[in-house]
Image: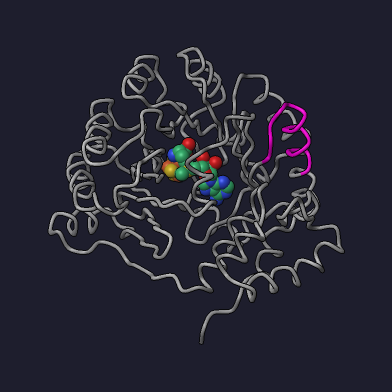
Amino acid sequence: MAGIYIHIPFCKKPCFYCDFYHVISVNDNSAFIDALLKEVTLRKDYLEDETVSTIYLGGGTPSVFSIKDLGTILNHINKLFRVTEDCEITIELNPDDVQPAYLEGLKNHNINRISLGIQSWRDSDLKMLNRRHDSVQAVVALKETLNAGFENVTIDLIYGIPGMSLKEWESNLDFSFSFGIKHLSAYHLTFEPGTVFGKMLKKGTISEIDENDSAAQFNILIEKAESAGFVQYEISNFGKPGYFSIHNSNYWKQVSYLGLGPSAHSFNGYSRQWNIRDLKDYIKSVNAGKSFFEREELDIKTRFNEYIMTSLRTMWGIDLEYVEGMFEKEGYDYVVNLAGKFRNYGLMKLEKKSLVLTNQGKLISDNIISEFMMPGNE
Ligand SMILES: C[S@@+](CC[C@H](N)C(=O)[O-])C[C@H]1O[C@@H](n2cnc3c(N)ncnc32)[C@H](O)[C@@H]1O
Ligand code: SF4
């Protein structure tokens, strides 16, 4: 069982917070599509004949592509990989690209999971983030998606936005749960160097919200999601039972995946590859059949650190039997000894044979994870 991620690197307008690789252009995608199809062929053996049970079209903005172009990409993948009948196929849509005919087209290509980039239901936030859409377009897009018969619909929201009060965040959540969504991804705003917000932060023209406000917003998120029937199966991801993202869960469970397109990552259990983060260079290298990625063989410490980093963010936590089998007694003792301190502080708990973060621990998950990291070989 494996997954395929496809990165479509085009956006119509830059959001001020976003560090995902994208270029501001929507015209003339044909050179990119040609290269992408070539990359599919070049890398058809990467998954070693494993069946593909998830495909994720992300970006950038996959919804800048026509149905015909999306169909060409998916058909080519279907020809060269063993894609399961009930494969979870997700596409990220920007609300202002959503149209009934477009949604029908997606269904015709067996796309069965829609991720809508709502971010906030408040126009002042959307303006501040430099989003293309407004709140009316967001509501229409979500209603149309649900009316089109998509059952598995998720939305993205951002909290920790400067100027957003706790009450406003609460009403963003209430409003989201008033629709029949099955999944929510809620991310705390991060200020990434190189983005407009990152530069503004450096200059002092914007500031991060207070730590206590962040904690309050995170706590209310957990509370409201839970009472609306959602399970927090990862720090930023909440799903109704039966609707957790299989694709993302596989990333956290060390399942192999192939990443296609500029900046996409691939993983096969023992090595990780990064495609070049530049559209022109990507197209040039793929066309020349030259290597367009960097590759890192993962030594045992790196694999251990990656396992901790991903598993501790999920509701399944660190599986102690897996740790013992994979990293032997040394890894097991290391984890159990370190966990003792966090358990005493009420930040971690033992559930069956797994170590999971408590709600209090989730608030400082990054700090806890970094304490678990094993230093590399010098
Ligand atoms: C690849 S992006 C976007 C997909 C789609 N292009 C869109 O904008 O709706 C995936 C999600 O990551 C989140 N995100 C990206 N950068 C972020 C940041 N700096 N802070 C918080 N959330 C961020 C946003 O919620 C976004 O929808
Ligand atoms: S958030 Fe989405 S639309 Fe905005 S720049 Fe990033 S990828 Fe593009």
Q: Is residue 119 above or below residue 360?
A: above
Q: Is residue 144 above or below residue 49?
A: above
Give percent across and percent down for residue 76: 21, 37
Give the camera-side residue of 37 and 253.
253
Q: Is residue 339 magenta?
A: no
The answer to whether one can see residue 40 in this image is yes
Give percent across and percent down for residue 103: 39, 19
Q: Quadrant of the N terminus?
A: top left
Give the camera-side residue of 18 and 285.
285
Hey, which quadrant is residue 185 in on the image?
top right
Q: Main secondary structure of the magenta part?
A: helix
Q: Residue at x 35, y 50 (%)?
A: 259
Q: How is the image coloured?
A: one colour
Give the camera-side residue of 13 and 238.
238
Using residue 89 as the reference point, say whether residue 254 is left or right of it: right
Pick out the residue farthest to the top. Answer: 147
Q: Is residue 152 above or below residue 84?
A: above
Q: Residue at x 71, y 64 (%)?
A: 368
Q: Residue at x 61, y 64 (%)?
A: 323
Q: Residue at x 19, y 59 (%)?
A: 285
Q: Is residue 228 magenta?
A: yes
Pick out the residue farthest to the left. Answer: 288
Residue extent of the magenta highlight: 219-232
Pick out the residue farthest to the bottom. Answer: 378
Give percent across and percent down for residue 248: 51, 44
Give percent across and percent down for residue 152: 52, 25
How many marks do you count on the picture? 0
Using residue 340 as the reference point, say whether residue 268 is left or right of it: left
Using residue 238 as the reference point, say whether residue 256 is left or right of it: left
The answer to whether one can see residue 122 in this image is no
Give the camera-side residue of 118 and 367.
367
